[in-house]
Amino acid sequence: MKANKKELTKQEEFVREHRREHHRISSCRLLLFLLFLILWEVSADLGWIDSFFFSSPRLVLSCFLSMMRDGTLPMHIGITLLETVLSFLLVFVVSLACSTALWYSPRLSRVLEPYLVVLNSLPKSALAPLLIVWLGTGTRTIIAAGISVAVFGSIISFYTGFQQVDEEMIILIRTLGGSRRDAFRKVVLPGSLPILLSATKVNIGLALVGVVIGEFLAARRGLGYLIIYGTQVFHLHMVITSIILLCIIAMGFYKGIQYVEHHLRIRRQI
């Protein structure tokens, strides 16, 4: 009984120390961010940097509030969010389907592997003008640009995760009379879940990058369009505000997937 209490006390102390360390890291991150904002504002006020080109937190906040009041910013944010989510979902579905097909057919994977590597290495910004010619300007082109940036690397990552699953578990399933489909459903897919989630955290950022590239070239709405428009008219407060919002969106997507990953790990441990 005493041993159980002592073990429980150690576990509680470990949990408390883990939470304290988490709070310390969060506090350091917040402090670093606040110091950056203060230095940025002071540098602009004292003339160390030109606020016309580099803006300042005060001017960015003023621009943000002004665009929120006239209703333009929520519309642009919503468009970018919608295009990114659609691109990401399509990337996930296509990648999972293609990597599953490659796992089921080793010969097909050997045939297609060099093409996937080449397509993944191709600068996707080079495809954007072609996408405009093929699809015209608009949402379809932007979503296609978002997909093109992430999909080939995602297929490679998913397929690599499938290959790294313990081969002996697959042999055991087959020995017990299970089919290749059973091995995939009960061993390969659950076993590669951590790698799939890690690749997904990267994919959401890449989808956002592709969407912004598409909005640079083929949009009249979205944060990417605001960046290009603001640069053309030298409204650099708008440009920096849009960039900061993109950073916040990227962080939000990352944290969302991290939250899902955390809860899935807890469920697997239970």
Image: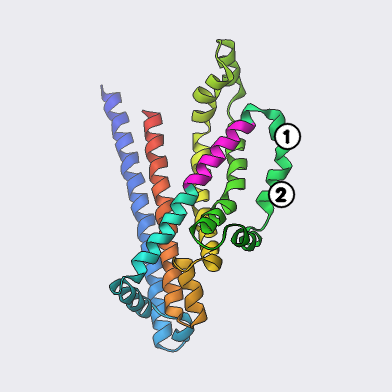
In the image, 8 versus 252, the foreground residue is: 252
Horizontal and vertical percent position of residue 158: 57, 38
| Residue shown at 55% from the left, 63% from the top | 213
Q: Check if residue 93 falls in the magenta segment.
A: yes
Q: Secondary structure at mark 1?
A: helix
Asked whether 118 or 43 is in front, the reply is 118
Say whether residue 230 is magenta.
no
- Name the colouring of the figure: rainbow
Question: Can you say which quadrant of the picture contains the N terminus?
Answer: top left
In this rendering, would 190 be left or right of 76? Answer: right
Magenta stretch bounds: 89-102
Q: Is residue 101 left or right of residue 57?
A: right
Q: Is residue 188 above or below residue 152?
A: above
The image's mark for residue 94 is none
Main SS type for the magenta part? Answer: helix
Residue at the top extreme? Answer: 176
Work out whether residue 49 can be spotted. no
- Residue type highlighted by circle 1: Arg
Give coordinates of residue 187: x percent, y percent.
52, 24
For badge 2, the amino acid type reads: Val
Q: Is residue 22 visible?
A: yes
Q: Quadrant of residue 263?
A: top left
Q: Which mark is residue 110?
A: 1
Q: Residues within 10 Å of mark 2 (few under 14, many from 20)?
A: few
Kindly identify which residue carries mark 2.
118
* Residue at the bottom extreme, as displayed: 47
Q: Residues within 10 Å of mark 1 (few under 14, many from 20)?
A: few
Quarter holding the C terminus is top left
Residue at 59% across, 37% down: 98
Q: Earlier in the sequence, mark 1 or mark 2?
A: 1
